[in-house]
Amino acid sequence: MPKVGLTMTEGSIVQWHKHPGDFVQKGALIFTFETEKSTLEFESPFEGVLTSILVPVGQVTQCFVPVAVIGEASNLSRPISPRARLRAREKGIDINIVSGSGPDGVVLERDVLASHPEPAAIRATPIAERMAAEMGIDLATIQGTGRDGLITKEDIEASVVGATPRGSPDAELQTLTTARRITAQRTADSARNAPHVTVTTEADATALVSAREQLNAELKEKVSYNALLIAIVARALREHPQLNAYWDDGRVLLYQAINIGVAVDTPRGLYVPVVRDATRPLIQLHRNLSDLLARALAGTVTGDDFAAGTFTITNLGMYEIDAFTPIINQPQAAILGVGRILGKPVARGEQVVVRQMMTLSLSFDHRIVDGAPAAKFLQRVKGLIERPFALMV
C-alpha cells in the first residue's frame, strides 16, 4: 500500500485493474486505492506478471504492507489450460504454486480447484441467520464466537451496532468508505474526549456583502465568503492566540502558524483541506482555497493538503442553515460554524431596518480555553464581519 503524503497511515483498494496471470508493463495501472481524503491510482514500478493479489477490494491496509506480487515474466511461462487460468484469476490463485496433472505438467482446472478448496460451511444459529438476511449481511464476513465458531445473534449485533434497524427487511446496509469511517471515528473521539462548549452570536453582514461585491467587480472573479472568513478568522486568531492552540496530554501548546481548514462536502465524504499561512493577502487566500476545493471535489488531493491545520471553519449557509453546533476537529482548540446570510428586520435606534444577518457558532475545548476568552474571540470575528475594511489596517 503506497504512502501518499505525510499524514497517510492506511488505505483501501477500490478496484483491481489487473488479475493474477496478467502481464503488467512498467507504468501500467494496477489498482485504484482510497486514502482518508482522496482516491488515487497506482502504476506498476516494474514489468512482470501479476502472480497473486494479497489484499481484496475494500480491506483497510496499513501503508507499506504488500498488496500483490509481481514476478519475472521469464519464470512464469508454464503451460496452463484456458479454463485453469480463468479459475485462477477468479480465485486470486498464484498459478506458479499449483502442480499440473496434465500431459507434460500442464495445469488443469481441477488442479487449480484442488489447490484452493472451498471453505468450510458457515454455521450460525437460526436467529443469527434471520438477522443477517434482514440486514443484508454476508455471514462469511462474521467471526463466530460460539462453540466451534458458531455465529450467534450477539456476533451479528456487534458487527453492525447502530447501523441498521433490527427487523427491517427494507433497510440497506451501507459499506463505509475510508473517509466516512475515519470521519466517524474522529468526531466520536472528539465528542467523547473534548469538553465541548458552544457560544453563538449574530453578526450584521451587510457591510461584508457589500465588500464582496466591490471585490468581485475589481478583481473580475468571484471571491467566496469562505475566503473572506478565513482572512477575518486569521486576524482574530493573531489577536487571540489562545484559540490557535491544541491539547497535548495535559499541556496547552500554542501554534506558531495560522493554518485554517475549511470543511467541504464531497462525493467521498467530509474533507477539511487546509489553507496554510492564512495571514496572507486576501486574493492569495481566495485562489489557494479555490484550488484546494476543486481538487477535493475531484478527489485528487493528497494527505499534505489536510496537514498542519490549527483552526477550522465549517459553513452550512449554502444549505439554508441558520445555526448549528460544530464538533471540534481535534487536537485543535476550536471550530467556527457559519450560518446563512439572511435579510432580517433589525432595530436601529428608533427605526426598524432590514439588514443582512449571519449567525456564528463557536465550539471550543474547555480544557484549552475558558468561556470569556472564547467569547472575546467570537466578538472580534463579529466585529470584523461588520467592519470588513478593518482588514486593510
Image (tube, helix red, strand yellow):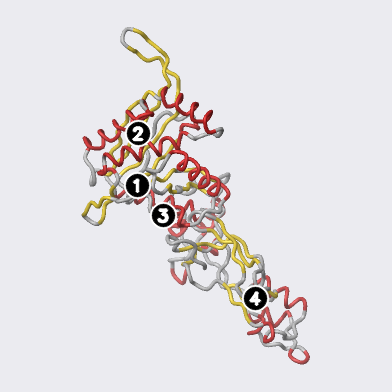
Q: Earlier in the sequence, mark 2 or mark 4?
A: 4
Q: Secondary structure at mark 3?
A: loop
Q: Give residue 5's position: percent from left, percent from top.
A: 47, 61
Left or right for 314, reference 301: left
Q: CA distance from mark 2 to mark 3?
A: 24 Å
* The disc label shown at residue 213, or none: none
Q: Residues within 10 Å of mark 1 (few under 14, many from 20)?
A: many
Q: Residue 307 bears which disc, if any?
A: 3
Label 2 sits on residue: 361
Q: Position of residue 197 (x, y in %)?
A: 28, 38
Residue 261 in the image: x percent, y percent?
41, 46
Query: Label 2, label 4: how many angstroms apart (C-alpha)?
Result: 53 Å
First of labels 3, 1 by sequence position:
1
Residue visible at 21% across and 35% down?
A: 372
Of circles 3 and 4, the one toward us is: 3
Q: Name the residue that disc number 4 marks.
A: 50
Q: How far is disc 3 from disc 4 in space, using C-alphas?
A: 35 Å
Q: Which residue is mark 1?
A: 258
